[in-house]
Image: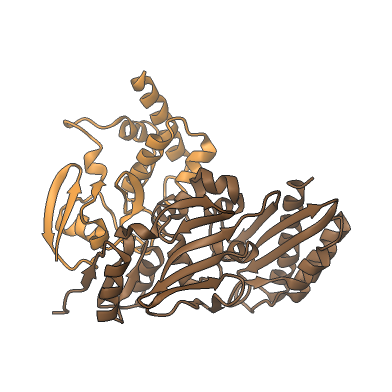
Amino acid sequence: MILNFNVNETNHEVNIDPSMPLSDVLHDLLGYKSVKQSCSTGICGACTIRFNGEARKSCLHMAGQASGSNISTVEGLSSNGSLSPLQESFINNFSFQCGFCTPGFLMSSAALLDENPNPSEDQIRDYLHGNICRCTGYLSIIDGVKEAATLLNKEGN
Amino acid sequence: MISETKYYRPDSLENAFDILSENPDAILLSGCQSLGLLSKEGIVSFDTVIDLAHIPELSGISYENGFLKIGALTTHRSIETSSIIQEHLPILSTAAEQIADVQIRNAGTIGGACAYADPTADYPPVLMATNAIIHAQSETGPSDYSARDGFFIDYYQSAIEPDEIITSIAIPIQENIGYGFEKLAYRKNDRAIVNVAVLLAISNNECTRADIAVAGVWDTPLIATKAMNSLIGTQLSDSDLSSASEIAQEEILVCDDPLISITYRSAMVGVLTKNALKTAREQLL
C-alpha cells in the first residue's frame, strides 16, 4: 500500500505493509536513525516522536495510522547545523550517558515545552514518565529540561 | 512472502460497516496502544485492519440534557484536559490522568479501552459507578449497554458483538455529587492492583446516593451493592464510612495473584474504599 509521510518537513512516499510499526518505517526504511527501538512494547519511550505535534510512541503505531500526518524526530530539532536550545541544555547538564534513550527524552521534552513553557519539576516528571533511562539517572535530565525552559523563555523575550 | 495486511481507513460509519460486512474477521483499530502490544506479543494476529480514526461520528465531547457524551475516539489525554469533563465529571479526568504516560494517553481512546475490557483499567470502575451507557452500532442499528449491568462480561471481554462498533459513552450527570477515585499500583500510573470509584450525594444531611465500584481484583470490575445500600440514609459519619468500607471489603470478590496475596488485596479494597468515600464526602460538606 502506498503511504505518505511528512517527516521534519520532508515528504516521503513509501510502498509498504501498512501494519508495519511506524518506528521501523522511520528508522529502517527512511533512515531517521534517532528513532530508537528498545522494548518495542510501549514501555521505554526510546521511540518517541511527535505525531502532528503530540509526543507518541512510534513502536505502538501502525504505519497506516500515520499516513498523511506530520512527524518530527530529533533530526528536525537542529537547524542549519546548530543544535536547538533543548539539545544544548542536555549537553550542558550531562543529561545522557550512553545516549540511547536521549532521542525519546528530547522529543517528549520538546512537546512539553511547546505545551507548557514554564513547567514545574512535578510537571516535568509527569511528562517524562513514559521515558526510561537506565544510566544517567533522571535528575540531570530534569535539570536539562529546566535549563532549556529558561533559555527558550529568554529567547522568546 | 506473507501477503500484505489489508488496511482500510473509512471516513464514515456507513463506510466502515460496508467494509466490516465484507471482512468479518477484520480487526478494528482505534488508538493501537493495547492492540499494538498484543500483536507484537503474538497474542493477536490479523490480516485486515479497519482504522476508525477518520470517522467524524466517533469524536467529540459534549454536555446536553444532563448527559455528558464522549465520542469513542476521544483520547485519554483529551479526557484528562477537557474543560467540559473537568466541570461535569472530574472523576473521569482523574482516572484518565492515571493511565500509563503522556505518549500513550495522546493515542489511546476511551472506546478502545471499553472494548478491550482490561480488568485492571481505570475507566471501568468510574463508568460503573456513574452508571454510564456505552452506545454501539452495527449495520442493523444501534444498541446500548449499561456499564454497570452486563457490559464487562469476563476477563478482557466486553459485551460488544463482532459486528458492532462502539460509537460513544454517555454518562448521566447529577448536580452536587462528591467523587472519589483511588488507585494502588506497582508504580505510578501502572496497572491497578486495586482501584475504586465512588459517588456520593446528600439531601437534608442524609445520604441519598452512594455508588462504589472496584476493579483490578477480579475478572471484571465489580459493584459493592451491600456497602452502597449501607450508606443510604446515613449522615456519612466517620463510622458510617468505616463500616461501609468493611462491608465492601467483605463482599468484593478477589482473585488469587502470584505476586499479591488475597488477604492483602482484599484489605486494600477496604482502605481504598474508605479513602475514596472520604474524598467524596469532603466535596459535599
- Residue drawn at point x = 46 percent, y = 52 percent: B61
Q: Is residue A153 above or below residue A50?
A: above
Residue A26 location, x and y as percent? Answer: 21, 55
What colour scheme does the image use?
by chain
Looking at the image, how many numbered discs can be counted on the residues? 0
Q: Nearer the viewer, residue B229 or A131?
A: B229
Quadrant in the rendering for residue B245: bottom right
Q: Which chain is orange?
A: A
Quarter of the image for residue B267 reads bottom right
Q: Return the x and y of residue B281 as percentages of the image width and height.
A: 77, 51
Residue B128 percent coordinates (x, y): 61, 66
Compared with residue A87, is residue B86 higher up or lower down, i.e. above or below?
below
* Side (left or right) of B252 relative to A130: right
> Is the C terminus of chain B in the top left, top right, bottom left or bottom right quadrant?
top right
Examine the image and state in which quarter residue B1 appears.
Answer: bottom left
**Which residue is depicted at the point 29% across and 59% down?**
B54
In front here: B222 or B261?
Answer: B222
The colour chain B appears in is brown
- Residue plotted at (81% across, 57% down): B207
What percent of the width, then of the height, locates residue B102?
Answer: 44, 50
Q: Is residue A80 in view?
A: yes
* Residue B99 visible in rendering: no
Q: Residue furthest front?
A: B65
